[in-house]
Amino acid sequence: MLSVAGHWSGSFRSNNTSLTPFTVTTVINQDTSGNLTAAMAFFDSPCISAANLRGTITGLSVALAGSDNAGDNITLKGTTNTAGTRMSLVYRLNASASGRCETDDGTGTLSK
């Protein structure tokens, strides 16, 4: 099974052109069944600043979902390269709990 455990960073861009791109850093942990946990930090995002995520990796497909302390929810889905060193992801955010952003979605890449 491909391992995506480790330190990742990258940038994300909202489909809402009024929002500026933001930086993401995370540490992903992976068990032998492909279950993932991640503590993710979002820099310069007006909608979310940090979240604890859970997910899976199946083949090259990655899915993560979680929320921050204010109850803002985020999901990330996408693929990793065969080396497990680069992910291309689509994100969807429902941040209505904090009132910072009602919803947001976009794309991003993370690299080890």
Image (spheres, rainbow, N blue to C red):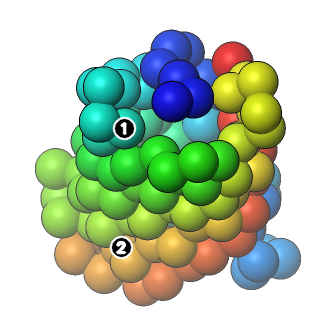
| Looking at the image, residue 41 lies above or below residue 90 | above
Report the side of 3 relative to 14 (left or right).
Answer: left
| Looking at the image, residue 7 lies above or below residue 80 | above
Depth check, mark 1 against mark 2: the one in front is 1
What mark, if any, has residue 95 been given in the picture?
A: 2
Q: Nearer the viewer, residue 6 or 98?
A: 6
Report the side of 111 relative to 35 (left or right).
Answer: right
* Residue 4 x %, y %: 54, 27
Q: Secondary structure at mark 1?
A: loop
Neighbor class of circle 1 (other Cα within 10 Å; few <14, some 14-19, many 20+) is some
Q: Nearer the viewer, residue 91 or 30?
A: 30
Image point (50%, 51%), residue name: 58
Q: Nearer the viewer, residue 84 or 49?
A: 84
Q: Which quarter of the figure is the C terminus placed in?
A: top right
Image point (35%, 59%), residue name: 65
First of labels 1, 2 by sequence position: 1
Query: At label 1, which amino acid type do we have?
Result: Gly
Which residue is label 1 attached to?
A: 34
Neighbor class of circle 2 (other Cα within 10 Å; few <14, some 14-19, many 20+) is many
Q: Are marks 1 and 2 in contact (CB under 8 Å)?
A: no
Report the side of 46 relative to 106 (left or right).
Answer: left
Whole-number angstrom distance, CA of label 1 to CA of label 2: 28 Å
| Looking at the image, residue 29 lies above or below residue 56 | above
Q: Secondary structure at mark 2?
A: loop
* Residue 75 visible in the picture: yes
